[in-house]
Amino acid sequence: MKNKFTLISTRIIAVIIVIFGLFQFLYIGNIDSPNYSPIFHENKTVELVLLLLFTCSSFVIAFGLWKLKKWAFILYILTTLIFQSYMVVNQRWEFNLIIWPIIVMTILTINYKKLQ
């Protein structure tokens, strides 16, 4: 039963991360539109580089979680720390930015011993 919980919970998280990554990817296509509002930085080049980095890391993390790998959890923690730190430094941090990572890290911490 516990292994089934690990499999299902990590794969659900992986699917949600892929969906989030797809939204990031779609946002990259709108960077030149008149309705553009920056997420990370006013400079569009910096914004594009950061979006590409976080989008790529999202897909790599999702792949690792789908395969139940410990390195995916560690990469998720590192990506979250970098993202949160960047948002704090640029004074764009909001409390709701930490809710999802806390939920994911709690579930993955519970399942950590079962990851390969």
Image: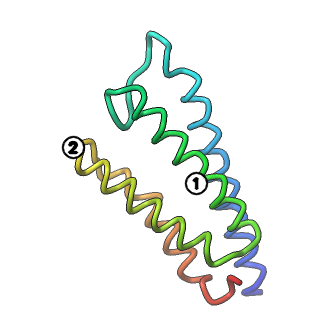
Q: Kindly identify the residue that appears in the image at 67 percent across and 59 percent down.
A: 62
Q: Secondary structure at mark 1?
A: helix
Q: Which of the 4 quarters of the picture holds residue 11?
A: bottom right
- Please state the horizontal and vertical placement of residue 102, each as a whole percent of the image: 43, 66
Under mark 2, the amino acid is Gln
Task: Report which residue position mark 2 lands on.
Answer: 91
What's the colour scheme?
rainbow
Q: Kindly identify the residue that appears in the image at 68 percent across and 70 percent down.
A: 9
Q: Relative to the observer, which residue lies in front, 11 or 54?
A: 54
Task: Report which residue position mark 1 lands on.
Answer: 57
Where, quadrant-wise, is the C terminus in this rendering?
Answer: bottom right
Q: Kindly identify the residue that appears in the image at 56 percent across and 74 percent down.
A: 107
Badge number at residue 20: none
- Please state the horizontal and vertical placement of residue 105, each as a whole percent of the image: 50, 71
Q: Kindly identify the residue that appears in the image at 53 percent across and 80 percent down.
A: 109
Crowding near the residue tagged with mark 1, few <14, some 14–19, many ≥20 C-alpha atoms within 10 Å: some
Q: Earlier in the sequence, mark 2 or mark 1?
A: 1
Residue 12 vertical placement versus 51 (above, below): below
Q: Which of the 4 quarters of the picture holds residue 41?
A: top left
**Taking 65 as reference, is 43 left or right?**
left
